[in-house]
Every structure is written in C-alpha cells, then in structure tokens.
Amino acid sequence: MRYVLAAILLIVIVILVLLFSKMTVWIAYRDDVLLIRLRFLILRYTYDSSRPKKEKKKTAEREKKTPEQAGESVPQEKADEKKAIGYWIDKIKEYYGLFCDVTTVAAKVLGALRYKLQVREVKIDVTYGTGDAAQTGMAYGGAWAAVSQLYMLLSQYLIFEYPRMELTPVFDQKCFSLAAEGIICFRPVHIIKAAVIGLSAYYKQLSHKKKDADR
C-alpha cells in the first residue's frame, strides 16, 4: 500500500511540475523564414521553415477550372444572383456574425490569460515604400499610431514590454520587408485553462444558435 501511495504522490508531483513550470518560446521571422525555438525544462525543440523538406511523390492532379476557363457557358441567373445587392448583404451579415463569434471567444481566452503571458524583447524592423512620397509619409505616422494603440490594448491582458521598432520609409519606390523577433513565456496550466474556457464559450454559442434556429 505504501508503494502505491508513493507512486500516486510521485505522479501528482510530476504533473504539477509539468503544469506549473515556465515554458519559453523564441520566435523570429526574416526574409520569409520562420524560426521557433521552444524550451521547457530539459526539453528543446527548434522549428526552421528554411530547412529543405523531403520531396513527396508527385501524383497526377487535374487542374480545376472555372466554367469560364473550360469554355462552358455560365447560367445568367447565377451571374445575376452574385451581382445582386441581397447577395452581398447576406455575405456581410455572415462575416459580421463570424467576427462577433471570434471576438467573443477571443475575449474569454484573453480574460483567462490576463497577465499570465509575458512577452519581452520584441524587435520589429520594417522597410516599406508605397511609390508615392506623400503616402509613404502618411503611412509612417499611421504605423506608429497603430503600434501605440496595439500596445495599449495588449498591455491590458499581457505582461508586455514596449517593442523596439524601426520603421525605414523608402520614398522613391514600392517595397516591403519585415523582420521580427520576440520571446513569449507562459505556464502550461494557464494555456490549458484558457483553452477550456474558449472551447466552452464556443460550444455555448453553438447551442444558442441551434436554439434560435429551432424557434
């Protein structure tokens, strides 16, 4: 009996250590290459999108063509339906409902993670140009304003250090390049809790929609 209790106690201790130990994720993006390094206790994992992937066997795939490309005539009624105002109104309602659902679940998840996630050493380097000097200058001011607003929003939910950001405008040509990196620290127990709350909120929304549809 003692050995059984000792084994149960040891399992509980291991689970608590796994749940409450800090996990660190370092993320970097540059030149279309994503690099992620994860550190958890003695575990180390690295993901590098620039690594060559094993080539899969090529299979014959038929190219999907629209009726116009295939030379087929498109029914006039279908074309008129897509151009109708009612069609776009329904689409807007659909996307608005989806947006409300996502924001509701996201608010629940962020509320559960309030000051549980730490984001630090964020560095962002952006080089951009619109091809027009006036528009490039306006974008420069707008980008800084957007960063400040986003920082104020995230600071309400995260332990977030103000990022070191460099904006380099190019006034005589169109271009865009992005390089970013940062470190995220969290404990698995908080992520699990937020996931459970998010899923429960999602299923509650589904149940309410079913009830409204049955009425």
Image (spheres, rainbow, N blue to C red):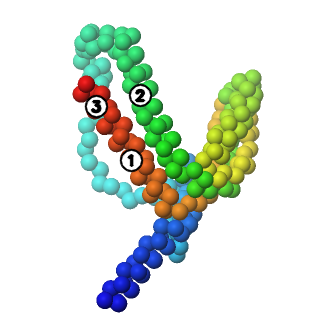
SS class, disc 1? helix
Q: Secondary structure at mark 2?
A: helix
Residue depicted at x 72% and y 45%: 165
Kind of residue indicated by mark 3: Lys
Residue 128 falls left or right of residue 26: right
Q: Earlier in the sequence, mark 2 or mark 3?
A: 2
Q: Are marks 3 and 1 in contact (CB under 8 Å)?
A: no
The residue at the point 25 percent across, 37 percent down is 62
Please provide percent x and percent y for residue 198. Answer: 43, 47
Q: Is residue 113 visible?
A: yes
Q: Residue at x 49, y 47 (%)?
A: 109
Q: Position of residue 106 (x, y in %)?
A: 49, 42
Q: Which residue is mark 3?
A: 211
Residue 147, picture quadrant: top right
157, 3: nearer the viewer: 3
Looking at the image, residue 136 sits to the left or right of residue 67; the answer is right
Instruction: Examine the rendered structure and indicate whether residue 162 appears above or below residue 51.
Output: above
Query: Which is closer to the viewer, label 3 or label 1?
Result: 3
Residue underneath mark 2: 97
Gap between marks 2 and 3, in whole Å?
A: 16 Å
Amino acid under disc 2:
Gly
Q: Are marks 2 and 3 in contact (CB under 8 Å)?
A: no
Instruction: Choose the circle earlier in sequence order: 3 or 1.
Output: 1
Question: Which residue was labeled with disc 1?
Answer: 199
| Mark 3 and mark 1: Cα distance apart in space | 18 Å
Amino acid type at mark 1: Leu
